[in-house]
Protein backbone atom coordinates (compact mmCIF):
# COMPACT_ATOMS: atom_id res chain seq x y z
CA UNK A 1 0.00 0.00 0.00
CA UNK A 2 1.59 3.28 -1.06
CA UNK A 3 -1.44 5.58 -0.91
CA UNK A 4 -4.46 6.24 1.27
CA UNK A 5 -5.80 8.69 3.83
CA UNK A 6 -3.50 10.05 6.50
CA UNK A 7 -5.56 9.33 9.60
CA UNK A 8 -3.12 10.51 12.26
CA UNK A 9 0.17 12.37 12.62
CA UNK A 10 2.09 11.49 15.77
CA UNK A 11 3.40 14.84 16.94
CA UNK A 12 6.72 13.65 18.37
CA UNK A 13 9.66 14.78 16.24
CA UNK A 14 12.34 12.10 15.87
CA UNK A 15 15.83 12.15 14.39
CA UNK A 16 17.14 9.37 12.15
CA UNK A 17 20.66 7.93 12.53
CA UNK A 18 21.55 10.16 9.53
CA UNK A 19 20.43 13.32 11.33
CA UNK A 20 17.15 13.81 9.40
CA UNK A 21 14.12 14.90 11.40
CA UNK A 22 10.72 13.30 10.83
CA UNK A 23 7.42 12.36 12.43
CA UNK A 24 5.49 9.11 12.15
CA UNK A 25 1.98 9.07 10.73
CA UNK A 26 -0.67 6.49 9.92
CA UNK A 27 -2.10 5.89 6.45
CA UNK A 28 -5.33 3.93 6.03
CA UNK A 29 -6.82 2.25 2.95
CA UNK A 30 -9.43 -0.49 2.60
CA UNK A 31 -9.40 -1.18 6.34
CA UNK A 32 -5.61 -1.59 6.52
CA UNK A 33 -3.31 0.80 8.37
CA UNK A 34 0.43 1.35 7.99
CA UNK A 35 2.91 3.69 9.59
CA UNK A 36 4.80 6.08 7.34
CA UNK A 37 7.35 8.84 7.85
CA UNK A 38 6.92 12.52 7.07
CA UNK A 39 10.46 13.75 6.43
CA UNK A 40 11.45 17.30 7.32
CA UNK A 41 14.40 17.51 4.90
CA UNK A 42 11.96 18.48 2.12
CA UNK A 43 8.91 20.74 2.24
CA UNK A 44 7.45 19.62 5.57
CA UNK A 45 7.84 20.74 9.14
CA UNK A 46 5.70 19.74 12.12
CA UNK A 47 3.03 22.36 11.45
CA UNK A 48 2.55 21.40 7.78
CA UNK A 49 2.78 17.67 8.58
CA UNK A 50 -0.21 17.94 10.91
CA UNK A 51 -2.23 19.44 8.04
CA UNK A 52 -2.02 16.07 6.25
CA UNK A 53 -4.47 14.51 8.72
CA UNK A 54 -7.62 13.54 6.82
CA UNK A 55 -5.96 14.10 3.43
CA UNK A 56 -5.06 11.61 0.73
CA UNK A 57 -1.34 10.93 0.46
CA UNK A 58 0.85 9.08 -2.02
CA UNK A 59 3.98 7.58 -0.52
CA UNK A 60 7.31 6.34 -1.81
CA UNK A 61 9.79 3.86 -0.34
CA UNK A 62 13.09 5.28 0.90
CA UNK A 63 16.43 3.46 0.69
CA UNK A 64 15.64 1.63 3.94
CA UNK A 65 12.32 0.30 2.62
CA UNK A 66 10.18 2.61 4.75
CA UNK A 67 7.16 4.46 3.39
CA UNK A 68 7.84 8.20 3.36
CA UNK A 69 6.64 11.54 2.07
CA UNK A 70 8.99 14.53 1.84
CA UNK A 71 7.51 16.90 -0.71
CA UNK A 72 4.25 18.66 -1.50
CA UNK A 73 4.87 17.62 -5.12
CA UNK A 74 4.02 14.02 -4.24
CA UNK A 75 0.54 14.90 -2.95
CA UNK A 76 -2.41 13.88 -5.14
CA UNK A 77 -3.69 16.70 -7.34
CA UNK A 78 -6.95 17.06 -5.40
CA UNK A 79 -4.93 18.08 -2.31
CA UNK A 80 -2.72 20.59 -4.14
CA UNK A 81 -5.21 23.42 -3.50
CA UNK A 82 -4.55 23.16 0.23
CA UNK A 83 -2.42 26.04 1.41
CA UNK A 84 0.48 24.84 3.53
CA UNK A 85 2.28 27.68 5.27
Image (cartoon, rainbow, N blue to C red):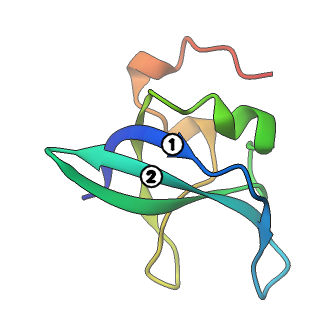
Which residue: 74% across, 43% down?
44
Tag 1–tag 2 contact (CB < 8 Å): yes
Q: Is residue 2 left or right of residue 18?
A: left
Which quadrant: the N terminus?
bottom left
Q: Position of residue 61 (x, y in %)?
A: 43, 69
How many marks on residues? 2
Residue 2 spot, x, y in % from top left: 31, 56
Residue under the point 63% across and 28% down? 51
Relative placement, left or right, of 19 versus 4 is right
- Secondary structure under badge 1? strand
**Residue closer to the observer: 49 or 43:** 49
Residue bearing the label numbered 1: 8
User: In the rendering, at what x and y percent does residue 60 appear?
Assistant: 43, 60
Mark found first going from the N terminus, 1 or 2: 1
Residue at horizontal 22 percent and vertical 44 percent from the top:
29
Which quarter of the rendering shows the C terminus? top right
Tell me if 58 is positioned left or right of 31 in this view: right
Give the residue number, with chain letter if any, for mark 2.
26
Question: Mark 2, residues whose alpha carbon is within 10 Å: few (<14), some, or many (≥20)?
Answer: some
Instruction: Give the Cα distance between marks 1 and 2.
Output: 5 Å
10 Å neighbourhood of mark 1: few (<14), some, or many (≥20)? Answer: some
- 65 is higher (above) or lower (below) than 30: below
Residue 49 position in % (x across, y down):
67, 40
Residue 39 position by quadrant: bottom right
Amino acid sequence: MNSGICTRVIRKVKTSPYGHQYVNAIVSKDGLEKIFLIGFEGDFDLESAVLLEGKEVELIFNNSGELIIKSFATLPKKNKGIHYQ
